[in-house]
Amino acid sequence: MNSTLVICKPDAVERGHVGEIISRLERKGLKISRLELRRIDEETAKMHYAEHASRTFFNELVEFITRSPSVIMEVSGPEETWAIVRVMMGATDPAIAAPGTIRGDLGYSVAENLVHGSDSAEAASRELGIFFR
């Protein structure tokens, strides 16, 4: 089994989409190995978004992800689970995300796009270590 990190971000929790997101992952045959409802603290958010630290939107990312609880999950499945999840999430911009994807069906903002999924096996390993120490 390979694992990846999936976060139902504050907007997904606030708008009541967590059940739908988990249901989609499970219908695909993926397994929720660990799950936690948690308000992400600033230190963890900064570690998670470290690759964006020099970008102008870094502080906005940190403020958004820490504003209210998120659902943090380790999702397991076949090889390249991270890639499967990324396709299911859809494009970062919900305006261009394909219908049938999480963001295409449920999202309406680039800044608040419901979910995060690791973008490689290496990122999944790093991110799981940040959130499930």
Image (cartoon, rainbow, N blue to C red):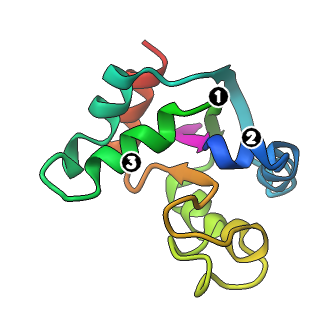
**Which residue is located at x 67 percent, y 48 percent?**
11
Say what secondary structure mark 1 lies in: loop
Tell me if 13 is positioned left or right of 115 in this view: right
Residue at image mark 3: 61
> Is 124 covered by the magenta stretch?
no
Residue sitting at the far left: 54
Please name whichever residue, 55 or 7, is drawn nearer the observer in this view of the structure. Answer: 55
For marks 3 and 2 on the same chain, the one whose residue lies earlier in the sequence: 2
> Is 5 covered by the magenta stretch?
yes
Residue 92: image location, x then y, percent: 50, 70
Cα gap from disc 1 to disc 2, whole angstroms: 7 Å
Residue at image mark 2: 13
- Name the chief secondary structure element in magenta: strand
**Which residue is located at x 46 percent, y 23 percent?**
131
Q: Relative to residue 58, is residue 110 depicted above or below? A: below
Crowd class of label 2 (few under 14; some 14 to 19; many from 20; radius 10 Å):
some
Q: Which residues are magenta?
A: 1-7
Give the residue type that dot 3 points to.
Answer: Leu
To which quarter of the image does residue 109 belong? Answer: bottom right
For marks 1 and 2 on the same chain, the one whose residue lies earlier in the sequence: 2
Residue at image mark 1: 69
Is residue 126 in view? no
**Which residue is located at x 53 percent, y 76 percent?**
93
Give the residue type that dot 2 points to.
Answer: Val
To which quarter of the image does residue 38 belong? Answer: top right
Crowd class of label 1 (few under 14; some 14 to 19; many from 20; radius 10 Å):
many
Q: Are marks 1 and 2 in contact (CB under 8 Å)?
A: yes
In which quadrant will I find the C terminus? top left
Crowd class of label 3 (few under 14; some 14 to 19; many from 20; radius 10 Å):
some
